[in-house]
Amino acid sequence: MLWKRIIVGDQERALITKNGRFGGILAPGDYRLFTMPGVSLDVEKYNVRDLVFQSTWADYLAKERPQVAERYFTRVETNDLQVAMIYVDGKLFKVMLPAKRLLFWRGAVEVTAEVVNVIDEPQVPAQKLPALERLGKESLASFYLVEEAKIGLLYIDNRLVRTLSPGKYGFWAVTGSPRVDIVDLRRQTIEVPGQEILSRDKVSLRVNILAEYQVKDAVKAKQTISNFEAYFYRLLQLTMRQALGRKTLEEILAEKTEVDESVASAVRTDMNALGVAVGAIALKDIILPGEMREIMNQVVSAEKQAQANLIRRREETAATRSLLNTAKLLEDNPILVRLKELETLEKLVEKVDRVTLSALV
């Protein structure tokens, strides 16, 4: 008969096996175990501060020795549709994956667990978010922030589940593949720059198009078409090319920034079917080729010169007509002639410094 002394510390537990068979678990204390010749006695010591019982005996104890497992461990187990939030002394320690089993040592700390069915409850409760965010990737959750004036569309397995109002959200990511698309509900502008267009009179020009839009129905906008912003961009391109291509350069320049209402109405109708309201549509810039700009400058210069000549001729005609009217008045009224002479004499006298009178003898 052989005796073997085993000392188990206050932070330790010892698992005893004899010839490969489970013999028991020893709590803290001083033990003397005896064995018969030919019997192999093995002792495995564990520090309970490590919390998780990492041993090949874990499944055996959970299945075959449930009473022993209940005495020394806190058992946490999940099925294929569950996760477990494990707390140590009331603080979140980790999140356990589905289809797992863990044994936590009793005694050192208090271990509790909250098992959640992620299919029935895919959203993380708001009060759990701060603790789960602290775990980062180990939280097994995806986090999203929906800002003010925006709306979130929640998809699970690429299926729209519901809309999300502004706020912070978390969803379990172990099953279902959650995704949140954020849609801005504020009024926005889109610019289509540098569109090369050939006018009806074969003049090549480049225009920049500016349009306002606002999403009114986020669900319709996202479900009707994959990318409504890209669609709106291409719609503006195509529509404006067709509309401006039917006009001459002079007509385009005459419109300046305005867009034909029938064209704008067609764009609005098309986008409204996608849940998007379109506001003003305008030509932000009209850029002509270098040689065409020079020709246009010459045309403008000639027009301004012609206007200046016309104004000058009008002024000359008015002055001549005024002189003619004055002459007719003087011809018919001698007194008016005398007054005119005195007026002229008065003006001359104002310019004379000294007057000398000489008497004739």
Image (spheres, rainbow, N blue to C red):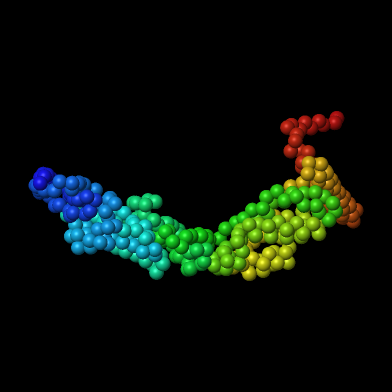
Q: Residue at left 25%, top 61%?
A: 64
Residue 74, percent from left and from top: 23, 59
Q: Nearer the viewer, residue 220 or 297?
A: 220
Q: Residue at left 22%, top 57%?
A: 73
Quadrant of the rendered image containing residue 218: bottom right
Q: Is residue 151 left or right of residue 64?
A: right
Q: Nearer the viewer, residue 247 or 228?
A: 228
Q: Is residue 107 left or right of residue 246?
A: left
Residue 219, percent from left and from top: 54, 67
The answer to whether one can see residue 48 in this image is no
In the rendered image, the vertical position of residue 323 relative to residue 216, given as above or below? above
Quarter of the picture containing the C terminus is top right
Quadrant of the rendered image containing residue 235: bottom right
Q: Residue at left 65%, top 60%?
A: 231
In the rendered image, the vertical position of residue 343 relative to residue 65, given as above or below? above
Q: Nearer the viewer, residue 3 or 168?
A: 3
Q: Residue at left 43%, top 58%?
A: 173
Q: Is residue 186 left or right of residue 303?
A: left
* Outermost residue, front side: 37
Give the tally of numbered discs: 0
Residue 360, percent from left and from top: 85, 31
Residue 292, percent from left and from top: 81, 44
In the rendered image, the vertical position of residue 319 relative to residue 275, given as above or below? above
The answer to whether one can see residue 349 in this image is yes
Q: Nearer the viewer, residue 63 or 331?
A: 63
